[in-house]
Image (tube, rainbow, N blue to C red):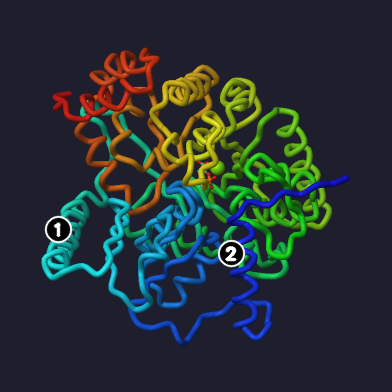
Protein backbone atom coordinates (compact mmCIF):
# COMPACT_ATOMS: atom_id res chain seq x y z
CA UNK A 1 0.00 0.00 0.00
CA UNK A 2 1.27 3.45 -0.86
CA UNK A 3 1.10 5.61 2.25
CA UNK A 4 1.43 9.36 2.27
CA UNK A 5 2.30 11.57 5.19
CA UNK A 6 1.71 15.29 5.32
CA UNK A 7 3.42 17.83 7.52
CA UNK A 8 1.12 20.06 9.49
CA UNK A 9 2.17 23.18 7.61
CA UNK A 10 1.46 21.42 4.31
CA UNK A 11 -2.09 20.86 5.50
CA UNK A 12 -2.39 24.48 6.69
CA UNK A 13 -1.04 25.59 3.35
CA UNK A 14 -3.62 23.58 1.45
CA UNK A 15 -6.40 25.04 3.60
CA UNK A 16 -5.09 28.59 3.11
CA UNK A 17 -4.81 28.00 -0.60
CA UNK A 18 -8.35 26.68 -0.91
CA UNK A 19 -9.63 29.69 1.03
CA UNK A 20 -7.72 32.02 -1.25
CA UNK A 21 -8.97 30.34 -4.40
CA UNK A 22 -12.52 30.59 -3.10
CA UNK A 23 -11.99 34.28 -2.46
CA UNK A 24 -10.62 34.54 -5.99
CA UNK A 25 -13.99 33.29 -7.29
CA UNK A 26 -12.44 30.02 -8.30
CA UNK A 27 -10.39 31.54 -11.11
CA UNK A 28 -7.50 29.25 -10.26
CA UNK A 29 -5.07 32.15 -10.67
CA UNK A 30 -4.07 34.17 -7.66
CA UNK A 31 -4.22 37.94 -8.18
CA UNK A 32 -3.69 41.18 -6.30
CA UNK A 33 -6.19 42.02 -3.64
CA UNK A 34 -7.46 45.55 -4.18
CA UNK A 35 -8.83 45.61 -0.64
CA UNK A 36 -5.48 45.28 1.11
CA UNK A 37 -5.33 48.20 3.56
CA UNK A 38 -2.39 50.59 3.42
CA UNK A 39 0.70 49.50 5.39
CA UNK A 40 -0.74 46.03 5.88
CA UNK A 41 1.29 43.48 7.79
CA UNK A 42 0.33 39.85 7.31
CA UNK A 43 0.43 37.34 10.15
CA UNK A 44 -0.16 33.80 9.08
CA UNK A 45 0.69 30.18 9.78
CA UNK A 46 3.09 29.83 6.91
CA UNK A 47 3.79 31.21 3.46
CA UNK A 48 5.18 29.43 0.45
CA UNK A 49 7.69 31.28 -1.77
CA UNK A 50 4.94 31.53 -4.39
CA UNK A 51 2.62 33.29 -1.96
CA UNK A 52 5.42 35.59 -0.85
CA UNK A 53 5.71 36.88 -4.42
CA UNK A 54 1.99 37.60 -4.42
CA UNK A 55 2.22 39.59 -1.18
CA UNK A 56 4.59 41.99 -2.84
CA UNK A 57 1.96 42.82 -5.45
CA UNK A 58 -0.72 43.20 -2.80
CA UNK A 59 0.89 46.16 -1.09
CA UNK A 60 1.86 44.19 2.02
CA UNK A 61 4.79 45.91 3.79
CA UNK A 62 5.89 43.14 6.18
CA UNK A 63 4.91 39.68 7.35
CA UNK A 64 5.37 37.20 10.15
CA UNK A 65 4.71 33.47 10.08
CA UNK A 66 4.22 30.96 12.86
CA UNK A 67 6.29 28.31 11.09
CA UNK A 68 9.38 28.30 8.91
CA UNK A 69 13.11 28.98 9.22
CA UNK A 70 15.28 31.96 8.24
CA UNK A 71 16.98 29.88 5.52
CA UNK A 72 13.69 28.85 3.87
CA UNK A 73 13.10 30.07 0.34
CA UNK A 74 10.27 32.21 1.73
CA UNK A 75 12.75 34.05 3.98
CA UNK A 76 15.36 34.32 1.19
CA UNK A 77 12.73 35.75 -1.13
CA UNK A 78 11.53 38.24 1.50
CA UNK A 79 15.09 39.57 1.68
CA UNK A 80 15.25 39.73 -2.09
CA UNK A 81 12.03 41.73 -2.46
CA UNK A 82 12.95 43.67 0.68
CA UNK A 83 9.89 42.90 2.75
CA UNK A 84 10.77 42.86 6.48
CA UNK A 85 9.79 39.45 7.84
CA UNK A 86 9.99 37.26 10.90
CA UNK A 87 9.47 33.52 10.50
CA UNK A 88 8.83 30.82 13.09
CA UNK A 89 7.02 33.18 15.51
CA UNK A 90 4.87 30.54 17.18
CA UNK A 91 1.58 31.69 18.64
CA UNK A 92 1.78 35.14 17.11
CA UNK A 93 -1.74 35.08 15.66
CA UNK A 94 -3.05 34.32 19.12
CA UNK A 95 -1.44 37.40 20.68
CA UNK A 96 -2.19 40.02 18.05
CA UNK A 97 -5.62 41.43 17.35
CA UNK A 98 -6.70 42.36 13.86
CA UNK A 99 -5.91 46.05 13.26
CA UNK A 100 -3.37 46.33 16.09
CA UNK A 101 -0.08 48.15 15.37
CA UNK A 102 3.07 46.06 15.24
CA UNK A 103 6.72 46.57 14.41
CA UNK A 104 8.51 43.85 12.46
CA UNK A 105 12.26 43.98 13.00
CA UNK A 106 13.50 41.59 10.34
CA UNK A 107 17.16 42.24 11.21
CA UNK A 108 16.83 41.04 14.80
CA UNK A 109 13.93 38.63 14.22
CA UNK A 110 11.72 40.65 16.59
CA UNK A 111 8.05 41.43 16.56
CA UNK A 112 6.74 44.17 18.84
CA UNK A 113 3.02 44.37 19.44
CA UNK A 114 1.29 47.68 20.23
CA UNK A 115 4.54 49.66 20.60
CA UNK A 116 4.43 52.65 22.95
CA UNK A 117 5.69 56.06 21.88
CA UNK A 118 9.23 55.48 23.13
CA UNK A 119 9.56 52.17 21.29
CA UNK A 120 8.19 53.72 18.14
CA UNK A 121 10.66 56.62 18.40
CA UNK A 122 13.49 54.13 19.02
CA UNK A 123 12.60 52.19 15.86
CA UNK A 124 12.22 55.30 13.72
CA UNK A 125 15.70 56.32 14.86
CA UNK A 126 16.98 52.79 14.16
CA UNK A 127 15.51 52.94 10.66
CA UNK A 128 17.24 56.28 10.10
CA UNK A 129 20.59 54.87 11.35
CA UNK A 130 20.21 51.93 8.96
CA UNK A 131 19.60 54.38 6.12
CA UNK A 132 22.73 56.36 7.05
CA UNK A 133 24.79 53.16 7.29
CA UNK A 134 23.58 52.07 3.85
CA UNK A 135 24.42 55.39 2.24
CA UNK A 136 27.92 55.21 3.75
CA UNK A 137 28.33 51.69 2.36
CA UNK A 138 27.06 52.91 -1.01
CA UNK A 139 30.29 54.93 -1.37
CA UNK A 140 32.02 51.59 -2.00
CA UNK A 141 29.87 50.91 -5.06
CA UNK A 142 32.00 50.64 -8.16
CA UNK A 143 35.20 50.16 -6.18
CA UNK A 144 36.98 46.86 -6.70
CA UNK A 145 36.90 44.13 -4.06
CA UNK A 146 40.56 43.49 -3.33
CA UNK A 147 42.28 42.37 -0.16
CA UNK A 148 45.07 44.31 1.58
CA UNK A 149 47.53 41.82 0.09
CA UNK A 150 46.20 42.60 -3.38
CA UNK A 151 44.14 39.51 -4.07
CA UNK A 152 41.11 40.38 -6.20
CA UNK A 153 37.82 38.87 -5.06
CA UNK A 154 34.83 38.33 -7.33
CA UNK A 155 31.50 39.47 -5.90
CA UNK A 156 28.47 38.31 -7.82
CA UNK A 157 24.76 38.53 -7.12
CA UNK A 158 21.98 36.04 -6.49
CA UNK A 159 18.66 36.80 -8.16
CA UNK A 160 15.25 35.25 -7.83
CA UNK A 161 13.19 37.35 -10.21
CA UNK A 162 14.13 39.17 -13.42
CA UNK A 163 13.30 42.48 -11.63
CA UNK A 164 16.21 41.85 -9.22
CA UNK A 165 18.55 42.74 -12.05
CA UNK A 166 18.04 46.42 -11.17
CA UNK A 167 19.71 45.85 -7.80
CA UNK A 168 22.54 43.93 -9.53
CA UNK A 169 23.25 46.96 -11.74
CA UNK A 170 22.89 49.43 -8.85
CA UNK A 171 25.36 47.51 -6.70
CA UNK A 172 27.67 46.91 -9.69
CA UNK A 173 28.08 43.20 -9.05
CA UNK A 174 30.54 41.35 -11.31
CA UNK A 175 27.64 39.30 -12.66
CA UNK A 176 24.98 36.89 -11.49
CA UNK A 177 26.33 33.84 -9.67
CA UNK A 178 22.91 32.30 -9.07
CA UNK A 179 19.66 32.86 -10.95
CA UNK A 180 17.01 30.78 -9.18
CA UNK A 181 14.86 30.05 -12.25
CA UNK A 182 12.17 28.15 -10.37
CA UNK A 183 10.40 31.43 -9.58
CA UNK A 184 9.44 31.57 -13.29
CA UNK A 185 7.46 28.40 -12.67
CA UNK A 186 5.41 29.64 -9.70
CA UNK A 187 1.87 31.05 -9.43
CA UNK A 188 0.75 29.52 -12.70
CA UNK A 189 -1.00 26.36 -13.77
CA UNK A 190 1.41 25.28 -16.51
CA UNK A 191 5.21 25.60 -16.69
CA UNK A 192 6.68 28.29 -18.98
CA UNK A 193 7.53 26.85 -22.41
CA UNK A 194 10.91 27.10 -24.14
CA UNK A 195 10.10 30.44 -25.82
CA UNK A 196 8.93 32.09 -22.62
CA UNK A 197 12.01 30.90 -20.74
CA UNK A 198 14.28 32.01 -23.57
CA UNK A 199 12.67 35.48 -23.51
CA UNK A 200 13.13 35.72 -19.71
CA UNK A 201 16.80 34.73 -19.88
CA UNK A 202 17.37 37.15 -22.76
CA UNK A 203 15.99 40.03 -20.67
CA UNK A 204 18.50 39.32 -17.92
CA UNK A 205 21.39 38.83 -20.39
CA UNK A 206 20.63 42.18 -22.02
CA UNK A 207 20.38 43.96 -18.67
CA UNK A 208 23.73 42.51 -17.60
CA UNK A 209 25.47 44.03 -20.63
CA UNK A 210 28.20 41.40 -21.03
CA UNK A 211 28.60 40.35 -17.39
CA UNK A 212 28.26 36.62 -16.69
CA UNK A 213 24.87 35.10 -15.93
CA UNK A 214 24.72 31.78 -14.07
CA UNK A 215 21.37 30.16 -14.76
CA UNK A 216 20.56 27.47 -12.26
CA UNK A 217 18.34 24.79 -13.72
CA UNK A 218 15.01 24.15 -12.06
CA UNK A 219 15.19 23.50 -8.31
CA UNK A 220 11.54 22.70 -7.64
CA UNK A 221 10.41 20.42 -4.83
CA UNK A 222 10.91 20.73 -1.06
CA UNK A 223 9.45 24.14 -0.11
CA UNK A 224 8.97 25.21 -3.75
CA UNK A 225 6.05 23.18 -4.94
CA UNK A 226 4.84 22.81 -8.49
CA UNK A 227 1.31 24.15 -8.73
CA UNK A 228 -1.21 21.34 -9.19
CA UNK A 229 1.35 18.58 -8.70
CA UNK A 230 -0.25 15.58 -7.08
CA UNK A 231 3.10 14.19 -6.03
CA UNK A 232 3.74 14.14 -2.31
CA UNK A 233 6.30 12.38 -0.20
CA UNK A 234 7.00 11.96 3.46
CA UNK A 235 10.10 14.18 3.44
CA UNK A 236 10.14 16.66 0.56
CA UNK A 237 13.65 17.97 1.32
CA UNK A 238 15.01 14.47 0.79
CA UNK A 239 12.63 13.59 -2.00
CA UNK A 240 12.11 14.29 -5.65
CA UNK A 241 13.67 17.74 -5.71
CA UNK A 242 15.77 19.78 -8.18
CA UNK A 243 17.81 17.67 -10.60
CA UNK A 244 16.10 14.49 -9.39
CA UNK A 245 12.76 15.85 -10.53
CA UNK A 246 14.22 17.09 -13.83
CA UNK A 247 15.80 13.72 -14.62
CA UNK A 248 12.57 11.95 -13.78
CA UNK A 249 10.57 14.30 -16.00
CA UNK A 250 12.62 15.31 -19.07
CA UNK A 251 9.54 16.99 -20.56
CA UNK A 252 9.94 19.59 -17.80
CA UNK A 253 13.73 19.78 -18.13
CA UNK A 254 14.35 19.74 -21.89
CA UNK A 255 12.61 23.05 -22.72
CA UNK A 256 14.78 24.72 -20.08
CA UNK A 257 17.98 23.16 -21.46
CA UNK A 258 17.04 24.34 -24.95
CA UNK A 259 16.20 27.85 -23.72
CA UNK A 260 19.47 28.18 -21.77
CA UNK A 261 21.58 26.86 -24.65
CA UNK A 262 19.87 29.20 -27.13
CA UNK A 263 20.33 32.17 -24.78
CA UNK A 264 24.03 31.36 -24.46
CA UNK A 265 24.73 32.85 -27.89
CA UNK A 266 23.83 36.30 -26.60
CA UNK A 267 26.15 36.64 -23.61
CA UNK A 268 28.42 34.82 -21.17
CA UNK A 269 25.84 32.35 -19.86
CA UNK A 270 26.78 29.56 -17.48
CA UNK A 271 24.53 26.63 -16.64
CA UNK A 272 24.46 25.35 -13.06
CA UNK A 273 22.90 22.07 -11.92
CA UNK A 274 21.48 21.90 -8.39
CA UNK A 275 21.46 19.08 -5.85
CA UNK A 276 23.57 16.49 -7.58
CA UNK A 277 24.57 13.72 -5.22
CA UNK A 278 26.32 11.31 -7.59
CA UNK A 279 28.39 11.71 -10.74
CA UNK A 280 26.02 9.19 -12.29
CA UNK A 281 23.32 11.92 -12.20
CA UNK A 282 25.84 14.35 -13.66
CA UNK A 283 26.53 11.99 -16.59
CA UNK A 284 22.79 11.74 -17.22
CA UNK A 285 22.56 15.54 -17.28
CA UNK A 286 25.57 15.87 -19.59
CA UNK A 287 24.02 13.30 -21.95
CA UNK A 288 20.76 15.28 -22.01
CA UNK A 289 22.67 18.49 -22.72
CA UNK A 290 24.50 16.79 -25.56
CA UNK A 291 21.19 15.46 -27.00
CA UNK A 292 19.72 18.95 -26.73
CA UNK A 293 22.68 20.42 -28.62
CA UNK A 294 22.17 17.86 -31.40
CA UNK A 295 18.51 18.68 -31.67
CA UNK A 296 19.25 22.43 -31.81
CA UNK A 297 21.77 21.76 -34.57
CA UNK A 298 19.21 19.77 -36.51
CA UNK A 299 16.72 22.61 -36.09
CA UNK A 300 19.39 25.16 -37.17
CA UNK A 301 19.09 27.00 -33.88
CA UNK A 302 22.25 28.68 -32.60
CA UNK A 303 23.90 27.99 -29.24
CA UNK A 304 27.31 28.66 -27.79
CA UNK A 305 29.54 25.57 -27.89
CA UNK A 306 31.59 27.11 -25.07
CA UNK A 307 28.86 27.52 -22.47
CA UNK A 308 30.34 26.82 -19.05
CA UNK A 309 28.63 24.04 -17.14
CA UNK A 310 28.95 23.74 -13.39
CA UNK A 311 27.11 22.33 -10.44
CA UNK A 312 26.11 23.25 -6.96
CA UNK A 313 27.77 21.39 -4.15
CA UNK A 314 25.02 21.20 -1.57
CA UNK A 315 24.79 17.54 -0.64
CA UNK A 316 27.51 16.12 1.65
CA UNK A 317 28.09 13.24 -0.78
CA UNK A 318 28.88 15.75 -3.52
CA UNK A 319 31.21 17.70 -1.23
CA UNK A 320 33.08 14.50 -0.40
CA UNK A 321 33.28 13.70 -4.13
CA UNK A 322 34.05 17.28 -5.20
CA UNK A 323 37.26 16.23 -6.98
CA UNK A 324 35.28 13.83 -9.12
CA UNK A 325 32.64 16.46 -9.98
CA UNK A 326 35.39 19.00 -10.72
CA UNK A 327 36.98 16.67 -13.25
CA UNK A 328 33.85 16.89 -15.44
CA UNK A 329 32.83 20.51 -14.95
CA UNK A 330 33.90 24.11 -15.52
CA UNK A 331 33.04 25.40 -12.03
CA UNK A 332 31.60 24.39 -8.67
CA UNK A 333 29.41 26.53 -6.44
CA UNK A 334 28.88 25.72 -2.77
CA UNK A 335 25.24 25.97 -1.73
CA UNK A 336 25.64 26.28 2.02
CA UNK A 337 21.91 26.60 2.72
CA UNK A 338 21.37 23.02 1.71
CA UNK A 339 24.84 21.75 2.56
CA UNK A 340 24.23 22.72 6.19
CA UNK A 341 20.70 21.30 6.12
CA UNK A 342 21.85 17.94 4.78
CA UNK A 343 25.09 17.70 6.78
CA UNK A 344 23.40 18.36 10.11
CA UNK A 345 20.11 16.62 9.18
CA UNK A 346 18.08 19.76 9.93
CA UNK A 347 15.13 20.72 7.79
CA UNK A 348 15.88 24.36 6.97
CA UNK A 349 12.20 25.28 7.02
CA UNK A 350 11.41 23.64 10.35
CA UNK A 351 11.60 26.20 13.15
CA UNK A 352 11.53 23.43 15.80
CA UNK A 353 15.06 22.34 14.86
CA UNK A 354 16.33 25.64 13.62
CA UNK A 355 18.45 26.19 16.71
CA UNK A 356 20.67 23.37 15.41
CA UNK A 357 21.26 25.08 12.06
CA UNK A 358 24.91 26.00 12.43
CA UNK A 359 27.05 27.30 9.55
CA UNK A 360 30.07 27.14 11.87
CA UNK A 361 29.71 23.48 12.80
CA UNK A 362 33.19 21.93 12.32
CA UNK A 363 31.70 19.26 10.03
CA UNK A 364 30.26 21.94 7.73
CA UNK A 365 33.51 23.91 7.69
CA UNK A 366 35.48 20.76 6.91
CA UNK A 367 33.25 20.02 3.91
CA UNK A 368 33.47 23.61 2.63
CA UNK A 369 37.26 23.51 2.91
CA UNK A 370 37.40 20.15 1.13
CA UNK A 371 35.45 21.56 -1.82
CA UNK A 372 37.62 24.67 -2.07
CA UNK A 373 40.78 22.53 -1.96
CA UNK A 374 39.41 20.02 -4.48
CA UNK A 375 38.64 22.85 -6.91
CA UNK A 376 42.13 24.30 -6.47
CA UNK A 377 43.81 20.95 -7.11
CA UNK A 378 41.71 20.42 -10.25
CA UNK A 379 42.16 24.01 -11.47
CA UNK A 380 38.38 24.49 -11.40
CA UNK A 381 36.96 27.70 -9.88
CA UNK A 382 34.94 27.28 -6.70
CA UNK A 383 32.33 29.83 -5.71
CA UNK A 384 29.86 30.05 -2.87
CA UNK A 385 26.26 31.14 -3.43
CA UNK A 386 24.55 30.08 -0.19
CA UNK A 387 23.51 32.72 2.36
CA UNK A 388 26.81 32.23 4.18
CA UNK A 389 28.58 34.01 1.30
CA UNK A 390 26.59 37.20 1.93
CA UNK A 391 26.99 37.28 5.70
CA UNK A 392 29.87 39.61 6.63
CA UNK A 393 30.43 37.65 9.88
CA UNK A 394 31.79 34.80 7.76
CA UNK A 395 33.72 36.76 5.12
CA UNK A 396 37.15 36.58 6.79
CA UNK A 397 36.69 32.94 7.66
CA UNK A 398 35.89 32.12 4.03
CA UNK A 399 38.75 34.23 2.68
CA UNK A 400 41.11 32.40 5.03
CA UNK A 401 39.77 29.09 3.72
CA UNK A 402 40.81 30.15 0.21
CA UNK A 403 37.46 31.30 -1.21
CA UNK A 404 37.74 34.24 -3.60
CA UNK A 405 34.41 34.03 -5.48
CA UNK A 406 31.24 34.95 -3.64
CA UNK A 407 27.64 35.28 -4.83
CA UNK A 408 25.04 36.86 -2.57
CA UNK A 409 21.96 38.97 -2.34
CA UNK A 410 22.89 42.27 -4.08
CA UNK A 411 22.16 44.39 -0.99
CA UNK A 412 24.87 42.51 0.95
CA UNK A 413 27.60 43.26 -1.59
CA UNK A 414 29.09 46.50 -0.25
CA UNK A 415 29.20 45.30 3.34
CA UNK A 416 31.03 42.12 2.36
CA UNK A 417 33.33 44.19 0.14
CA UNK A 418 34.14 46.46 3.09
CA UNK A 419 35.35 43.42 5.06
CA UNK A 420 37.34 42.06 2.12
CA UNK A 421 39.06 45.39 1.51
CA UNK A 422 40.23 45.51 5.13
CA UNK A 423 41.54 41.92 5.24
CA UNK A 424 44.77 40.23 4.33
CA UNK A 425 44.49 36.64 3.17
CA UNK A 426 48.12 35.97 4.10
CA UNK A 427 47.37 36.97 7.69
CA UNK A 428 44.03 35.18 7.80
CA UNK A 429 45.15 31.80 6.48
CA UNK A 430 47.06 30.51 9.56
CA UNK A 431 44.38 31.91 11.89
CA UNK A 432 41.64 30.17 9.96
CA UNK A 433 43.64 26.92 9.84
CA UNK A 434 43.65 27.09 13.61
CA UNK A 435 39.86 27.59 13.70
CA UNK A 436 39.40 24.62 11.39
CA UNK A 437 41.27 22.41 13.86
CA UNK A 438 38.49 22.89 16.47
CA UNK A 439 36.31 19.84 16.92
CA UNK A 440 33.92 21.33 19.48
CA UNK A 441 31.16 23.32 17.74
CA UNK A 442 30.84 25.44 20.90
CA UNK A 443 34.34 26.91 20.47
CA UNK A 444 34.09 28.07 16.87
CA UNK A 445 31.80 31.15 17.15
CA UNK A 446 34.09 32.83 19.71
CA UNK A 447 37.15 32.03 17.56
CA UNK A 448 35.42 33.58 14.53
CA UNK A 449 34.48 36.67 16.61
CA UNK A 450 38.16 37.06 17.53
CA UNK A 451 39.10 36.74 13.87
CA UNK A 452 36.62 39.47 12.97
CA UNK A 453 37.67 41.86 15.69
CA UNK A 454 41.37 41.74 14.76
CA UNK A 455 42.60 44.71 12.80
CA UNK A 456 44.49 43.73 9.67
CA UNK A 457 47.55 45.53 8.43
CA UNK A 458 48.26 43.73 5.16
C1 LIG B 1 21.89 26.76 -1.30
O1 LIG B 1 21.36 25.68 -1.05
O2 LIG B 1 22.80 27.25 -0.61
C2 LIG B 1 21.42 27.56 -2.43
C3 LIG B 1 22.04 28.66 -2.81
O3 LIG B 1 20.31 27.14 -3.09
P1 LIG B 1 18.84 27.32 -2.50
O4 LIG B 1 18.91 28.24 -1.31
O5 LIG B 1 18.02 27.89 -3.60
O6 LIG B 1 18.44 25.94 -2.14
MG1 LIG C 1 20.12 24.73 -2.49
How far from the left and from the top, in percent, is residue 153? 34, 35
Residue 169 figure quarter: bottom left
Element at badge 2? helix
Q: Secondary structure at mark 1?
A: helix
Task: Choose between 237 and 247: the one closer to the eye.
Answer: 237
**Residue at figure coordinates x 37%, y 60% from the top left:** 85
Location of residue 122 (image quadrant):
bottom left
The crowding category of the residue bearing disc 2, from other C-alpha atoms within 10 Å (few below 14, some 14 to 19, many at least 20), is: some
Which image quadrant: the N terminus?
Answer: top right
* Whether residue 449 is situated above or below residue 370 in the rendered picture: below
* Location of ligand 2 given as a quarter of the image: top right
Q: Position of residue 278 (x, y in %)?
A: 70, 28
Q: From where the camera sits, is residue 368 visible?
A: yes
Q: Count all numbered tags in the image, as a single digit.
A: 2
* Horizontal relation, residue 448 to residue 352: left or right: left
The residue tagged 1 is 129
Q: Is residue 316 above or below residue 419?
A: above
Q: Give the class, few, some or many, for how many residues have Cα within 10 Å of label 1's Cα (few <14, many ≥20).
A: few
Q: Which of the labelled discs sits on residue 195, or is there none?
A: none
Residue located at (44% from left, 54% from top): 75
Q: Nearer the viewer, residue 76 or 21?
A: 21
Q: Is residue 168 visible?
A: no
Front in this rendered view, residue 14 or 429:
14
The residue beneath circle 2 is 200
Q: CA distance from mark 1 to mark 2?
A: 37 Å
Q: Residue furthest right?
A: 1
Mark 1 and mark 2 lie on one chain; the one further toward the N terminus is 1
Residue at the extreme front: 94
Question: Is residue 211 placed above or below 124 in the rendered structure?
Answer: above
Coordinates of residue 440 in the picture (x, y in percent): 37, 17
Amino acid sequence: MNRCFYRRDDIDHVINRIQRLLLDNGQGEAHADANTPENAIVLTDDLTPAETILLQHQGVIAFATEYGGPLSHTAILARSIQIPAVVGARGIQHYVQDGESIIIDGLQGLLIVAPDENTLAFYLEKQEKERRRNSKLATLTGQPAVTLDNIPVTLMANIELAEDIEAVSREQASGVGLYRTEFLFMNRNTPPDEEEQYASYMKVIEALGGKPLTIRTLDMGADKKIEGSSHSCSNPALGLRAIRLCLKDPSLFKPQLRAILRASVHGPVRMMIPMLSTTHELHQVLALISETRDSLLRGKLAFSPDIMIGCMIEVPAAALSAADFASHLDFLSIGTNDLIQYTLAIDRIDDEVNYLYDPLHPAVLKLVKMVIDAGKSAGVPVEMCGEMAGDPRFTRLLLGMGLTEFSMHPTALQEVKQVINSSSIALLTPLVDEILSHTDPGEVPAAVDRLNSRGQTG
